[in-house]
């Protein structure tokens, strides 16, 4: 903690908290804050700040303390009026000179982040003239793309830490500077970070402050508007007036405090340790939401040991990749959208040893202390679940408490909706009166956004009902808790913020909500009662039909056959059937940690059940591939020092005990059912080598790459081909034809050419998924390596291998049926020609990196070379450049 001294009051205005203090107190806090208290971020609040951060915290990172100072004449006037004291205006431009003077006297190392290299050169000259003893640790002028790129920003933060900056002046403009500090401030190692806007340009003389007359009159904004009307007219003439009106309505004085709250980075409990609470989060396309949620959980983890498990339902926006940036969070990928209940059931297998389980929506924010209140309430006798008070994005109470569905309540809601909120309880499923949210009480059920369930209740009540893909699953679960003789407790002392709609909304989802209400009632009531309830739901939709979407919803509710077309979990994988021990799967892996889990998870159940012998051979790995593989149930791991795919395949053969054997690339996904189907195809004896069909996943590919693969998939193959899909299987007799795998690049082509067409088979099973390169450069590199494999075999005078370039080109031209296929064929031929005409690939282990999503790691990763930013460090520049790795 910063030494307290006399307390200072705070101003709460439009959701923003402003610290009220004089100039000397502010300088004391900035200059004397110790490292042990954690980094202190300092900003200033004016009307523009209120416009940006209204009802949005400026300190979402739990590892920072924020000090927000009073800036802007309207805020100063309002604070002085309602506070009864004269508080000065403390802008960054007012404070920076005394801060730098004190830093010069004390030998404090200062760094500057923001602006451009030319400005930095002028800055260093002017600082040398005014503060000759100031120790400038370095200047950084990041490009805009670097500020939004996680790896690039992390690298900048690492450079700042290496420069041993104590006070970092951040001049990136609002809200970019506050957001960057919140995400990367701790990583810089600076003990104070000053979000001071254009102060770097002022110090360098590139921008002039308003004359003293304008500043004293509170009209500095008018001066700046006259200087830059095009850039600032919207800010001062459109954005600020509404903020001024909101300030007049909402400003109030808060209780004084003696210091900004001290925080520190808090880790979560690992899988093998006891946790007071395991937070279980189900995500689906929640990329913008998961960071604030995890940050809030870290704050609460200061009071309780917390484990965090995130179950990702096959998000396509990189949600899982964002979560992996937190190495102490367990990430479980389901491989498909299993729905909320299905995701919870998967996550229950990873909760570990814990007292309570906290079910959370990803779009929830957990303020400090909320988890402690929920955990304490769950210790009360007879409590089966605890739910908090929810606030919406505007800070208003979110109506989250409901009554058990019934015919009378549904009828009341159909007629009145949310009107007449104080009507009797038998006439509404919604619990709307505001007074009902002020005190703790027992309830029927609540929205599933945040539910804390004691561990013994989780064990007694069991799995969630996956018949409810989304909506009504919590109604079912709460009913089962009540049927066990326990109570559902609503506790308003625990407050959470729920933004809502984090995974999206659509007509289909709204229809599903209505249909699942009917399904729930049908599950627990007689057919006549359920039919009446369904009719009332239809009546409610009829009364609210205002457009085509309302009509579609009504038609679906009335047509039970249409229910099957609503969003639902993918069909469960069929039972494997037959005998166990059907064959082996051998997966060579060289630094495949980012993709290995998604390859292994579909095979895990069959491996654990004894149907498949899954062996991962990590060869020459310098990453966490082996640890990732060992974390998947049923998988056996071998480790080789040498990076060699043929050696890995041969080592896997020596370790395996079952035949046939499927040889699978570590980045190719094959379902267990497909793997078993391919292995079963080899049991008859007439087929010696087999593979299953495959599809290219071009979701992340550029348009040119997609065009290439469209043409490639149109090429007709007269004979079965088992190479090029990253997966092929051999029977014992088939493998005996060549013995060990030779040292060749194209092992699949080598194997394919050992057999005649009659000895091969392509099994019609679930297609293997091959993720394509994302850009043309990566695609050309992959094709060059493929060509290297062909040329290797030709050079070995392998008569079964030939250069098929001309025949392939002819086959591509035959696929042309119109303008689009002609464009695709042209693109295919151009890219193929580029692959053939460029420099030859090398024979070392190579693969496409563009399709591999980068896994979470604690080390700073390199970023692609782009135009360089300025990075100068007086007196230490030469030594620091020599110490940095190439490319930085």
Image (cartoon, grey):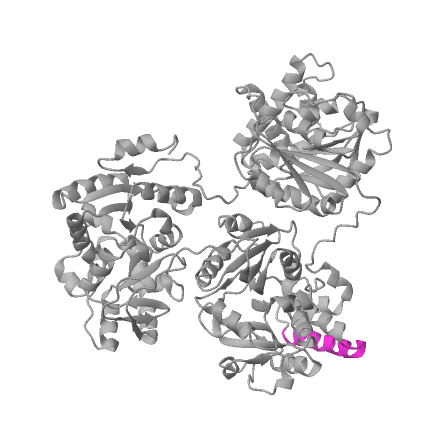
Answer with left or right where residue 431 lies relative to residue 199.
right
Extent of the magenta region: 525-544
Q: Position of residue 117 (x, y in %)?
A: 27, 39
**Above or below: residue 414 compared with residue 182:** below
Q: Position of residue 133 (x, y in %)?
A: 15, 43
Q: Position of residue 503 (x, y in %)?
A: 57, 59
Quadrant including the C terminus: top left
Answer with left or right where residue 300 lies relative to residue 643.
left
The reply to whether the magenta stretch includes residue 505 is: no
Please name the predominant secondary structure of the magenta segment in the image. Answer: helix
Answer with left or right where residue 17 lies relative to residue 372.
left
Q: Nearer the viewer, residue 715 or 54?
A: 54
Measuring 68% from the left and 83% from the top, which residue is drawn there?
Answer: 408
**Above or below: residue 705 compared with residue 323:** above
Q: Nearer the viewer, residue 702 or 459?
A: 459
**Above or below: residue 212 compared with residue 443:** above
Q: Nearer the viewer, residue 594 or 130?
A: 594
Q: Residue furthest front?
A: 273
Q: Position of residue 267 (x, y in %)?
A: 46, 54
Q: Is residue 821 visible?
A: no
Q: Residue furthest bottom?
A: 424
Quadrant of res 1: bottom left
Quadrant of res 831: top right
Answer with left or right where residue 364 lies relative to residue 488.
left
Q: Is residue 658 visible?
A: yes
């Amino acid at each position: 903690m910063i030494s307290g001294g006399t307390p200072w009051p705070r101003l709460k205005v439009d959701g923003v908290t402003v610290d009220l203090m004089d100039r000397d107190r502010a300088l004391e806090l900035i200059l004397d804050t110790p490292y042990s208290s954690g980094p202190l971020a300092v900003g200033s609040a004016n009307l523009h700040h209120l416009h940006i951060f209204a009802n949005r915290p400026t300190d979402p990172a739990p590892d920072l303390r924020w000090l927000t100072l009073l800036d802007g004449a309207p805020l100063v006037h309002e604070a002085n009026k309602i506070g009864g004291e004269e508080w000065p205006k403390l802008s960054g431009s007012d404070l920076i000179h005394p801060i730098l003077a004190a830093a010069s006297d004390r030998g404090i190392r200062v760094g500057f982040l923001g602006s451009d290299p030319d400005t930095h050169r002028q800055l260093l000259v002017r600082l040398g003239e005014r503060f000759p003893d100031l120790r400038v640790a370095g200047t950084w002028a990041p490009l805009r793309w670097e500020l939004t790129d996680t790896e690039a920003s992390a690298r900048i933060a690492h450079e700042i830490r290496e420069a041993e900056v104590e006070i970092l002046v951040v001049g990136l403009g609002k809200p970019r500077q506050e957001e960057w500090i919140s995400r990367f401030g701790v990583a810089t190692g600076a003990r104070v970070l000053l979000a001071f806007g254009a102060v770097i340009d002022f110090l360098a003389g590139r921008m002039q402050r308003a004359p003293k007359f304008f500043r004293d009159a509170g009209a500095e904004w008018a001066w700046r508007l006259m200087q830059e009307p095009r850039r600032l007219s919207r800010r001062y003439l459109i954005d600020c007036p509404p903020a001024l009106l909101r300030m007049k309505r909402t400003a109030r004085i808060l209780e004084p405090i003696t210091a900004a709250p001290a925080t520190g980075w808090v880790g979560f409990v690992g899988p093998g340790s006891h946790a007071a609470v395991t937070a279980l989060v189900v995500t689906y396309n929640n990329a913008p939401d998961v960071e604030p949620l995890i940050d809030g959980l870290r704050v609460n983890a200061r009071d309780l040991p917390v484990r965090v498990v995130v179950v990702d339902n096959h998000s396509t926006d990189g949600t899982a990749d964002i979560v992996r940036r937190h190495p102490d969070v367990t990430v479980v990928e389901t491989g498909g959208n299993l729905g909320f209940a299905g995701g919870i059931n998967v996550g229950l297998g990873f909760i570990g040893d814990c007292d309570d389980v906290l079910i959370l929506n990803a779009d929830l924010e957990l303020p400090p202390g909320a988890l402690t209140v929920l955990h304490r309430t769950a210790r009360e006798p007879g409590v089966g679940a605890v739910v908090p008070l929810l606030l919406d994005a505007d800070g208003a109470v979110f109506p989250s408490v409901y009554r058990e569905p019934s015919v009378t309540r549904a009828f009341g809601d159909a007629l009145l909706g949310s009107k007449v909120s104080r009507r009797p309880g038998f006439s509404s499923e919604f619990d709307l009166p505001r007074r009902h949210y002020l005190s703790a009480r027992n309830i029927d059920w609540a929205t599933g956004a945040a539910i804390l369930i004691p561990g013994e209740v989780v064990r007694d009540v069991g799995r969630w009902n996956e018949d409810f893909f989304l909506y009504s699953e919590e109604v079912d679960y709460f009913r089962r808790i009540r049927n066990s003789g326990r109570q559902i407790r609503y506790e308003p002392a625990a407050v959470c913020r729920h933004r809502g709609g984090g995974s999206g909304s659509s007509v289909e989802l709204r229809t599903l909500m209505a249909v699942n209400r009917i399904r729930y009632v049908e599950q627990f009531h007689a057919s006549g009662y359920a039919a009446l309830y369904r009719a009332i739901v239809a009546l409610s939709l009829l009364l609210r039909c205002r457009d085509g979407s309302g009509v579609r919803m009504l038609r679906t509710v009335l047509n039970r056959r249409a229910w099957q077309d609503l969003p639902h979990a993918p069909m469960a994988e069929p039972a494997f059937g037959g005998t166990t021990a059907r064959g082996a799967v051998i997966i060579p892996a060289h630094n495949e940690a980012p993709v290995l889990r998604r390859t292994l998870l579909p095979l895990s159940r069959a491996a654990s059940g004894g149907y498949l012998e899954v062996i991962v051979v990590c060869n020459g790995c310098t990453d966490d591939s082996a640890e990732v593989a060992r974390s998947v149930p049923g998988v056996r791991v071998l480790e080789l020092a040498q990076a060699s795919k043929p050696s890995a395949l041969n080592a896997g053969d020596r370790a395996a005990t079952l035949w046939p054997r499927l040889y699978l690339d570590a980045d190719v996904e094959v379902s267990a059912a497909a793997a078993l189907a391919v292995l079963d195809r080899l049991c008859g004896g007439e087929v010696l080598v087999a593979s299953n069909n495959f599809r290219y996943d071009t979701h992340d590919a550029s348009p040119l790459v997609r065009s290439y693969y469209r043409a490639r998939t149109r090429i007709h193959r007269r004979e079965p081909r088992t190479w090029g899909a990253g997966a092929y299987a051999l029977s014992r007799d088939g493998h005996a034809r060549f013995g060990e795998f030779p040292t060749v690049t194209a092992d699949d082509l080598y194997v394919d050419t050992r057999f005649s067409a009659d000895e091969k088979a392509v099994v019609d099973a679930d297609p293997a998924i091959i993720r394509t390169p994302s850009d043309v450069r990566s695609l050309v590199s992959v094709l060059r390596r493929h060509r290297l494999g062909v040329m290797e075999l030709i050079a070995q005078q392998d008569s079964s291998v030939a250069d098929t370039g001309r025949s392939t080109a002819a086959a591509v031209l035959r696929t042309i049926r119109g303008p689009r296929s002609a464009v695709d064929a042209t693109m295919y031929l151009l890219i193929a020609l580029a692959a053939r005409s460029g420099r030859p690939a090398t024979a070392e282990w190579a693969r496409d990196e563009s399709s591999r999503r980068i896994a979470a790691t604690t080390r700073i990763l390199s970023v692609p070379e782009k135009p360089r930013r300025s990075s100068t460090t007086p007196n230490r520049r030469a030594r620091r450049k020599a110490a940095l790795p190439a490319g930085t």
